[in-house]
Amino acid sequence: MQVYTGPAIRNIAVTGHHHCGKTALIGSLLATAGAAEFGSTPTAYDDEELARDMTLANSVAWCEWNNNKINLLDTPGFSLFVHEAKSAMVAVESALVVVDAVNGIEAMTTRVWNYADEFNLPRVLLINRMDRDRADGMAVLDALQATFGRQVTPVQLPIGNANNFRGVVDLVTMKAYLYTSGSKGKGTVGDIPAGLADEAQHAHEALVELVAEGKDELMEEYFREGTIPEDHLIAALHEAIREDRIFPVLYTSAAANIATDHLLDFFEVYLPAASERVPVAARAAVRSLAAVGNGQSNGHANGHANGHDGSAPGGNGQAGGPPRDDNSEMVLRPVQDSQPLSLFVFKTISDPFAGHISFFKVFSGVVKTDATVQNFTRNAAERFSHIALMRGKTATEIPELHAGDIGAVPKLKATYTGDTLGEKSSPIFFEPVQLPEPAITFAIEPKTRADEDKLANGLHRLMEEDTLVRFFRDPQTSEFLIAGTGQQHIEVIVSKLRKRYHTEVTLKAPKVPYRETIRGRAEAQGRHKKQSGGHGQFGDCKIRIEPLPHGGGFEFVNDIFGGAIPRNYIPAVEKGIQETAVRGFLAGYPVVDFKVTLFDGSYHDVDSNELSFKVAGRLAFRKCMEQAKPAILEPIMQVEIEAPEEFAGALMGDLNQRRGRVQGMDRTATGNSILKAEVPMSEMLTYGADLISMTQGRASFHMEMDHYDYVPALQQEKIIAASKASGKTAVDEDE
């Protein structure tokens, strides 16, 4: 296997809406380059992906073309998994946005376009599946220009549409590339068909004019000569693409393997090489991490889903945040072999047999097999025993990788997605990618005791490779919860648990962590007397209960004078009240935000003991609750929704139906609307799926716990009735 350096490496993220042909396109590109059989899909190898006929996670494949190495990252296009596309963009210098020739611009087309824009990545638009019935390449081009601006310009014209699609016209060289069923992706070069000559000439002139804009020397040459010579145009187009001044449009059919060789030529000639990447932003110092473990994220503060510049790479936001000194200096690390070694882990696969496989991008220096490098994120040394290039699941070992290249290494002991590694003497830390928080949460229960023993291990391994899975225990409801981007995302995780780790689980809607409180004051006596021969039981106390402000918790005041209750029995009264408050009064939820004052009572010299006063405290508390206007509190979430402006009205109406209070609306730089609202958690349990349905997957949301508030009377009655039906409501005990 030949070793390549940065100038000969192209790293490209293949993105787009689901079912636009990304995976088939990569298979055809590999076949044209002689790296795979035509019709195969090396990047689609996971059992779950094959069963569902969709890409669920990023996959890497490479090929060689004209003494260059091309790394292709296949990314998901389904809305619940499209965050993987964003994670892939830290490792590439350009993005190929694939668009279906029939369906045109779809929801995720815009989403991945915006992701690439966040990273300042050059974008190439590829109109694929040109051989489909009703394919209309020029109509799709018009829609792309209307959506993304006049910078979108064709560098090819299609020869034919649908069943008649047989090649492309190169608007730089002004040559036609024609294909037949037996051409195996290799076209023949010829003259432009007569029927396309005028259209091609007009498109060529428009391309030349757009390339020349903003460059004085090119404009002078254009006005002087009336055109730009081919060799100058090639160099100028490469520069314009690299600088995001032009977004070129090409055409292909992956299924028929038409124009894939010309697409590979385009990658080689016009897309930026790995060495052309601008220096990568990083922090120059990392603090000591003696206490850092594996750092896997295991939940949110409230137990439920909380709903850069282009040169900065990223990760998955491991628990505890980036382990760095926030006052450390920001530096720019050039993508050069001569720089100290630094690399970034952008993906992890956890195989039940092979263990961890870490995918990394070399941002500087040269890494060699058997090298010992420092994990700056975890403060741990790692040995790279077998560096490999991955083509789907097939590994090819290689002795070394140079700055700008992408590789993989198995069985690192303390390295996870988002970690920075490198030369110990030159510590550096690359910033993580900001991914959305999970949008849906389910309660998860193992079906058997054997499944219970395997559940945590299996889920934590899946969390290592899927950065938006959360698994945690809600301390209030005592349920184990799993969170993800949507129902299908969770179903995929459950299926992997069953197939990979032989763990069967049941999913159900999570319990809402309601609480109970009081709105009034009350006084009551709790008197416990029991005689059963010999020493009896006697405890007597009088308490006053009153509300505290939200968040006040529980306060106990001892206001006993004159020894009405001996001092050693007073803690028992408090304990009895606290134990009863945990079990609730109205619907079995913990009582909070109240103050109890113990002000009187009596005792018996022989029969009184701690248990008697504990029971007396319970009785007094229940009597007080009957009079103190008990109420139920519900968690209120702070919700932020980003969506195209045309959906804003419908989303506001939907939030109002969910008892939400819309607090305001902003606009993003890209023209999207951002709605901010407070909504009860009970109304948001299925919001992720509902939002996808309402916006065709074009919106995203983030939510986090904000505060508790009173439940309206009608909803409170329903909660109490449901608790009684389930047998949860607290009942009096006479101990």
Image (spheres, grey):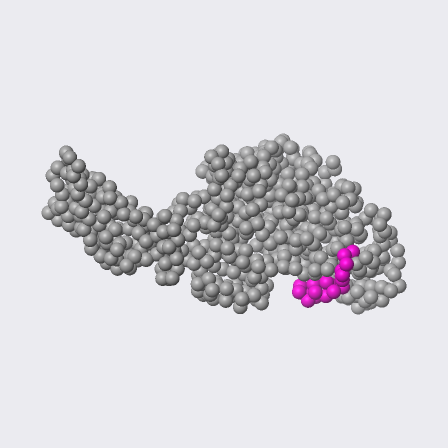
Q: Position of residue 223 (x, y in %)?
A: 79, 68
Question: Could you tell whether 709 is left or right of 347 in the image?
Answer: left
Question: Could you tell whether 508 is left or right of 671 in the image?
Answer: left
Quadrant where the C terminus sits is top left
Depicted 709 relative to depicted 433: above or below: below
Q: Position of residue 165 (x, y in %)?
A: 81, 57
Q: Quadrant of residue 109?
A: bottom right
Depicted 543 relative to depicted 151: above or below: above
Identify which residue, 298 or 709, lies in the foreground: 709
Question: Could you tell whether 710 is left or right of 688 in the image?
Answer: left
Residue drawn 32% across the image and 53% down it: 586
Identify which residue, 670 or 648, lies in the foreground: 648
Residue drawn 66% across the image and 55% down it: 17
Determine if residue 350 is in view: no
Q: Quadrant of residue 395?
A: top right
Identify which residue, 614 or 129, lies in the foreground: 614
Taking the magenta stretch, the answer to whether it contains residue 640 is no
Quadrant where the N terminus sits is top right
Q: Position of residue 578 (x, y in %)?
A: 28, 46
Residue drawn 66% across the image and 65% down it: 147
**Residues in magenta?**
130-151
Determine if residue 397 is in view: yes
Q: Position of residue 728 (x, y in %)?
A: 36, 48
